[in-house]
Image (cartoon, rainbow, N blue to C red):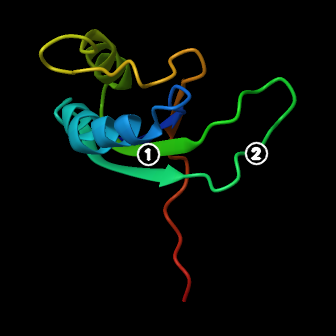
Amino acid sequence: MAEYQLIAMTSPVKGREDEFNVWYNDIHLKDVLKVPGIKSARRFRNHEPAVVPGQPPHRYLAFYEVETDDIEATIRELRSRPNTPKMTMSDALDTRTSILWVVEAISPTLVSE
């Protein structure tokens, strides 16, 4: 089975960071984990958002580990769920700047000795 990472780069709507984090941690991660093939989820906060010319700064990252033989079907299923009973969304998420990457593992995980 192929291994992928979904990388979500997100930011809250200005002034709604606490609400955004409660929704993301308590609701959204659990909704995403119900998509077949998505095995784990973890969020990270950027302490100093990096500003790259032409790119919006993202305050948060979420990494989702995916194992599937059909990544296109997994992504279709994920995209079909927002704003349905299967995936509650929050208007505290700044959707104008959100980015989702899907990357495929091309090497084994190496660990330090």
User: Which residue is located at x 52 percent, y 25 percent?
Assistant: 13
User: What secondary structure is marked by label 2?
Assistant: loop
State which tag comes first along the sequence, 1 or 2: 2
* Cα separation between marks 1 and 2: 18 Å
Tell me where residue 30 appears, x and y as whole percent: 20, 39
User: Residue flagged by tag 2: what amino acid is it?
Assistant: Ala
Q: Name the residue under label 1.
A: 63
Numbered label attached to residue 50: 2
Q: Nearer the viewer, residue 88 or 8?
A: 88
Residue 1 visible, this angle: no
Q: Residues within 10 Å of mark 1 (few under 14, many from 20)?
A: some
Quarter residue 82 falls in: top left
Above or below for 39 versus 6: below
Does 38 sit left or right of 101 as displayed?
A: left
User: Which residue is located at x 46 percent, y 38 percent?
Assistant: 17
Tell me where residue 100 appears, x and y as whole percent: 51, 27
User: What secondary structure is marked by label 1?
Assistant: strand
Tell me where residue 89 appears, x and y as whole percent: 29, 20
Which label sits in the foreground, 1 or 2? 2
